[in-house]
Structure formats: C-alpha cells, structure tokens
Image: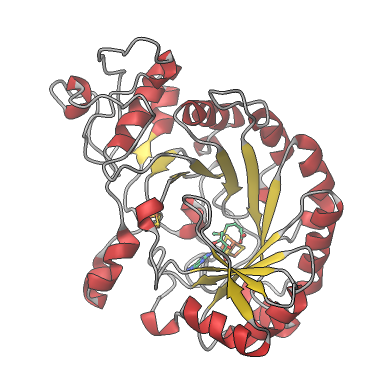
C-alpha cells in the first residue's frame, strides 16, 4: 500500500489563516509521495481558498469516520463471512492500532480543516477497551469557531445495554445501531454467531434511556435473505423514537461475493412500505446527508433510505475515513489509503500533519458509486477494495 510519507510542504501562507490550515492543497495523486522535491504537494501548485479545504470536485471535508478496531464479535454474512474471517484470520496487533492520542491528534487537525462530525466505527467499536476514554478526549475538541464536534457511534448493539450510560457520560452525542431482522432465527443466522435479537433491542432501549436518542437503526437489505423483513421492521419502529433506515447492499470489499441482483433498490423499499403505510417525501436534506427521508402520512415518524447503489450521492460526499491502523481513505471503495500513522510515529508536528491531510483531500477525485454502473462485473471484481470491517462503515 502506498505511503504518504511527508514532511511539511512550505507554501506562502495567506495572512490571517490559522497556522494549522496552511495546507498547500496541492494536486497530488492519492498515495503520491508528498515529500518528493518537485512533487505537486512540495511545490504547492494550488493554494487553499480562504473558505476552507475543497477537493477537486469542490467538496468540503466535514465528516470523519474512525475505525477503532478491525475485530468484531459478529460474522455478518455480508460483511465478515466466516469462510474469510475465520480462526486463522490475521487481525491487527495491538501496537499496530492508532492509540487514543494519535486518533485525537488526527481528529483535531481534521476539525481545523472543517470536520464537524466524528463517527466511531469498526469492526465493532464497543470491543475497543475504554472507548469511553477516547470519546472523552474527542469531546474536548472544537471547530475553529469554538463549537464541540458531534461524536457518533455505529455499533451492532451487542454491548450497548451495558455501555450506553457510560458512553453518554463520556460525551457521545448519537448512536446508530445495525439491525437486519426482527426474526430471531434469521437474525442469528445473519450475524452467524447465534446472537439473539432481543439483546440488540435492549441495547436500543438503553441508548434511548441514556439520552442518546433518537437512535438510528440501520438495516442492510439483501434480496432473498432479509427483504421479507422490510415491512415487519417498518411496522415495529413506526411511532417509536427510533428512526429506521434501509441501506442498499453494497459491493464493499471483495469477500462478500456481491451481485447487483441482490440489491433491493430504495425505490422498491419505499413502494413496498408505502402501499401498506402511506409515505411522503421529506424535502431537501442537509448537505452531504446520505439518507433520503420519508415521513408516514399519519404522523408515525420517518424512515430513511440510503441508496448508495441506485442513486449515488458522490457529488456531495464530504466523508473521509481513518482505518484502524491509521490510513486515511477518501472513499469507501478506495483500494489504497494514506499512511498517517507513519507520519505521526515519524514525529511530524500538527502543521505538517495538516499540510499532509490538506494535500490528500485537495487531490481527491473519488466517485466510485457514480461510475459503478459503467463497470462490467469482471472489472468490478478485479478492482481491489478494502473490507468494510477494516475501513469502517
Ligand atoms: N460493527 C458495527 C455495526 O455493524 O454497526 C460497525 C461497523 S459496520 C462495518 C458499519 C455498517 O456497515 C453496518 O451498519 C453494516 O450493516 C454496514 N455494512 C457492512 N457491510 C455492508 C455492505 N456490504 N453493504 C451495506 N452495508 C454494509
Ligand atoms: Fe461486525 Fe458490523 Fe461487520 Fe456485522 S456489519 S460483521 S457487526 S463489523
Ligand atoms: Fe463518497 Fe466514495 Fe461513497 Fe461516492 S463512493 S459517496 S465518493 S465514499
């Protein structure tokens, strides 16, 4: 994997720009050696507009997803199938993971570059020891105009009943729980470790009771596996404080054997639910929002649909991801990340880190979901992509 080993590039600094934002935003290819004399980053061919960091498609950086572990206690068939993630699978060693201090440094610099929202994910983030300690550190961070960052968590919910109160006390703002079926038999088959659905439902309730609501509940829909659970899930969460969101099954990674025919388009999901419980579209969502919102006409709340496959939203994608061992990915479907851990452990200062992150984002041109449809199945399969459990959802 290519490493972005860099020393700070020296570029003219517009007066009044905070030191940490002195990014050259040079046009460098992802994975380019940013320190090489004469490289785009080193020569600083493009300066940041004073309005903030933008990528090559004029998208700002607002959302940073941080994978805190590559391990998980579930083996969801569409994410970490047992045949691939079995007993012999080589997960990362402890010293390979970013420390809490390293994560916090990256998040601090990202906040200076415009990030307003952090999402902790994995693997299963609640498996990382003392996650509350990390959340407490992240809760101290501020945007350049002094606001705290939103700190969200995506979890399979298995340990949430036990941890919700402590997470809230540490400063967690929101939680998203993944839940693919209410049918205990099917749920246990999908997580493939016989984990009962009741305990996840208890976790959702605990999160709500701890003040982490409204809880978002994410259901990945795979045709022929759990699409018959769309209506029961909608009926269950209608009128509750939780918001159910349906996610189109995606071709992340290379181990889940994805096929286009297994995707249930969001339009079909909305139609199926709407026939039974009439829905109306809720107007424009916030910039970069992934879910399209629909409300029950009778006032029973809302659902969301995330149409990553059938209606790509790359045009407004403002998300970056940090893998468990500190690689910065500018797209969920990227094949390579930029090694920030090497920079941190090589002694780079915050200005240098800001320059490096700014250059990486400035060079970003990703829009995989928009081009997916133009790829033949052979080309798609040949394309190397990182696993969801490594990069975080
Ligand atoms: N373990 C946590 C969980 O399950 O919520 C966090 C990590 S998990 C990788 C994050 C999200 O990615 C989950 O909501 C999961 O359902 C979703 N996911 C995993 N593989 C997916 C796929 N192939 N297509 C769509 N969503 C997927
Ligand atoms: Fe684990 Fe989440 Fe992947 Fe399921 S979706 S295997 S819970 S990381
Ligand atoms: Fe963003 Fe990449 Fe997903 Fe497009 S495919 S929305 S660029 S993460």
In the rendering, at what x and y percent does residue 240 appear?
A: 79, 68
Q: Compared to 153, does 189 lie above or below?
A: below
Q: Is residue 309 left or right of residue 204?
A: left
Identify which residue is drawn at 38% across, 28% down.
Answer: 51
Placement of the N terminus among the 4 image quadrants: top left
In the rendering, at what x and y percent does residue 368 appear?
A: 31, 60
In the rendering, at what x and y percent does residue 233 appear?
A: 70, 78
Pick whichever, 354 or 291, lies toward us.
291
**Residue 183 occupies which quadrant of the picture?**
bottom right
Q: Is residue 97 left or right of residue 277?
A: left
Q: How many marks?
A: 0
Residue 231 seen: yes
Identify which residue is drawn at 30% across, 63% down.
Answer: 370
**Residue 117 occupies which quadrant of the picture?**
top right
Residue 68 seen: no
Q: Which residue is most to the right?
A: 209
Q: Which residue is most to the left?
A: 38
Q: How is the image coloured?
A: secondary structure
Q: Compared to 139, does 20 lie above or below?
A: above
Pick whichever, 133 or 112, lies toward us.
112
**Residue 19 occupies which quadrant of the picture?**
top left
Pick whichever, 240 or 294, lies toward us.
294
Q: Compared to 198, does 40 lie above or below?
A: above
In the rendering, at what x and y percent does residue 4 appear?
A: 30, 33
Q: Compared to 316, does 63 lie above or below?
A: above
Identify which residue is drawn at 47% across, 68% down.
Answer: 84
Q: Quadrant of ligand 1?
A: bottom right
Identify which residue is drawn at 23% across, 23% down.
Answer: 35
Pick whichever, 58 or 261, lies toward us.
58
């Amino acid at each position: 994997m290519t490493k972005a080993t860099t020393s700070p590039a020296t570029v003219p600094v517009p007066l009044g720009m905070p030191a940490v934002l002195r990014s050259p935003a040079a046009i460098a290819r992802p994975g380019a050696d940013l320190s090489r004399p004469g490289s785009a980053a080193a020569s600083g061919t493009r300066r940041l507009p004073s309005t903030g960091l933008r990528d090559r498609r004029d998208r700002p950086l607002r959302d940073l997803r941080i994978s805190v572990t590559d391990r998980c206690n579930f083996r969801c068939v569409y994410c970490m199938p047992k045949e691939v993630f079995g007993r012999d699978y080589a997960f990362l060693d402890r010293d390979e993971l970013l420390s809490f201090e390293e994560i916090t440094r990256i998040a601090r610099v990202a906040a200076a570059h415009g990030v307003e929202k952090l999402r902790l994910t994995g693997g299963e983030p609640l498996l990382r020891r003392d996650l509350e300690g990390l959340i407490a550190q992240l809760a101290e961070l501020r945007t350049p105009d002094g606001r705290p960052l939103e700190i969200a968590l995506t979890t399979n919910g298995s340990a949430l009943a036990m941890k919700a109160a402590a997470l809230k006390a540490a400063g967690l703002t929101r939680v998203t729980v993944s839940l693919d079926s209410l049918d205990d038999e099917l749920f246990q088959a999908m997580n493939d470790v016989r984990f009962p659905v009741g305990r996840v439902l208890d976790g959702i309730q605990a999160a709500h009771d701890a003040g982490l609501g409204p809880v978002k509940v994410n259901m990945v829909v795979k045709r022929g596996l759990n699409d018959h659970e769309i209506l029961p899930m909608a009926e269950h969460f209608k009128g509750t404080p939780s918001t159910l969101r349906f996610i189109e099954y995606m071709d992340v990674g290379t181990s889940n054997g994805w096929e286009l025919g297994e995707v249930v388009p969001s339009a079909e999901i909305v139609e199926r639910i709407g026939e039974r419980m009439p829905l109306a579209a809720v107007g424009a969502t916030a910039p970069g929002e992934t879910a399209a919102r629909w409300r029950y006409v009778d006032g029973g709340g809302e659902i969301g649909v995330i149409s990553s496959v059938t209606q790509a939203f790359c045009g407004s994608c403002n998300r970056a991801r940090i893998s468990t061992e500190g690689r910065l990915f500018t797209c969920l479907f990227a094949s390579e990340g930029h090694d920030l851990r090497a920079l941190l452990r090589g002694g780079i200062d915050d200005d240098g880190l800001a320059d490096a992150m700014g250059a990486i984002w400035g060079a970003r041109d990703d829009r995989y979901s928009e081009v997916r449809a133009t790829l033949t199945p052979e080309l798609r399969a040949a394309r190397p992509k990182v696993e969801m459990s490594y990069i975080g959802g």
